[in-house]
Structures are given as C-alpha cells and as structure tokens.
Amino acid sequence: MAAPTVTSSCTPVLVGVIDSVREIVQRGLAPEPTAHLAGQALRRVLGRPGLLAPEHCEGDPDRYRQHVLHAEPDGGFSVVALVWLPGQRTPVHDHVSWCVTGVHEGEETERRYLLEPSGRTSRLVAIEEVVNPVGAVAAFAPPGDIHRVWNGGTTKAISIHLYGADIARLGTSIRRTYAEPAEES
C-alpha cells in the first residue's frame, strides 16, 4: 500500500481523524457500517479548536466552497471541508460512494428525499428535513442517499465530509443531480 498523502496544512487533530478512518476502511466492511464507524470517529472532534487550518475555513461569496483536505493514494477515502455562507445550498443530489457529514461550525439544514415510481417515470418526495447543529453527524451509502443541504442560518457554517472515493481526482462527491420537486420551486 502506498504511503498516505496528507495535505501539508492538515492539523494534528485532523491527522488523527484520517488515521482512524484509514483503519476503519482497511477492515473491508460494507459501505453502511464503514460510514457509521467513520462517523463515530469524526463526531469526537467536531467543534474542537484546531481541527482545521485557517485557510480551510474560508468561504466563497458565490457558492459553497470545497476544500479537499486529504485523499488516500489508493482512492479508499477522502476528507473534505465544505464552507457555507448564509443561503448557500447544494442542488438535490446523490453520491458516488458512502458518505459521512459532520457539522463543525454553525448549522446546516438537510432535506432528504425518496425517489418514488410515478407511472413510467419517478418523482422525488421529501421525507425529512433536519437542522444539524455543531456535532451532528449523518452517515449514509447509496442507494437512497438523495438530499439537499444548505446554510439556513445567518453565520458561516463548516462541515467535514468523509467519502469512500478519491474526491481530489473526481472533483466532487455528487453522482447525479435531480430537478427540484415542483412544490419546492
């Protein structure tokens, strides 16, 4: 196995998370238990000072900003910080791999969807909306991982994302986007 590549500005706290996730991924478990265990490792450090370097807390006035913090050389997992200014949101989407999200600063709102058959096509139905405060963790794996996330607050929000894929290479964790349901337009 190649030596892990850690971004030079990863903090010691973040390196500890990376080491824990590496050990979990190397167990070779199915995606859902891998995501669950990785979420437990992440939960312990959320909201903790020193998790992120200052440059990984910078937002973008035009859209939420992605900072790739680490990608395993073998593509086994990635660690990403997303910085959300008030009102910034994702499209409705699903993912290329298992995923863990944890709120480090501020709060994020998440709306989860179910894709239901509707005649010859299908339609999205909102099934749950939650406001995630600092320390909240969600772990999931495809299929059935359709959601939208946004910063509905008045201050910056930062979340840490763990993905079972090489986001540095792929550029995004989004597999597919969906048209916004008509009742939400």
Image (cartoon, rainbow, N blue to C red):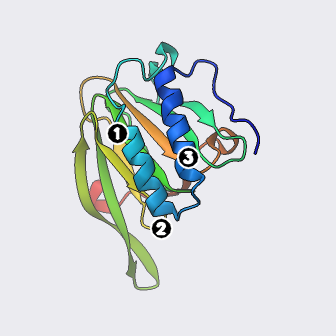
Residue, x 34% and y 62% (percent of image)?
113
Name the residue that disc number 3 marks.
23
Observer able to see residue 59: no
The circle on residue 143 is 2
First of labels 3, 1 by sequence position: 3
Circle 2 sits in a helix, a strand or a loop, which is it? loop
Residue, x 31% and y 35% (percent of image)?
151
Rendered image quadrant of residue 154: top left
Outermost residue toward the top in this view = 54
Mark 3, residues whose alpha carbon is within 10 Å: few (<14), some, or many (≥20)?
A: few
Seen in the image, is 75 located left or right of residue 132?
right
Seen in the image, is 135 located left or right of residue 163?
left
Q: Nearer the viewer, residue 117 or 130?
A: 130
First of labels 3, 2 by sequence position: 3
Circle 1 sits in a helix, a strand or a loop, which is it? helix
Give the number of the mark in front: 3 or 1: 3
- Residue 143, percent from left and from top: 47, 67
Q: Amino acid at mark 1?
A: Arg
The circle on residue 74 is none
- Residue 63, percent from left and from top: 46, 31
Tag 1 and tag 2, C-beta contact below 8 Å = no
Q: Amino acid at mark 3?
A: Glu
Outermost residue toward the bottom in this view = 119
First of labels 1, 2 by sequence position: 1
Name the residue that disc number 1 marks.
43
Give the number of the mark in front: 1 or 2: 1
Q: Amino acid at mark 2?
A: Pro
Residue, x 41% and y 85% (percent of image)?
119
Circle 3 sits in a helix, a strand or a loop, which is it? helix
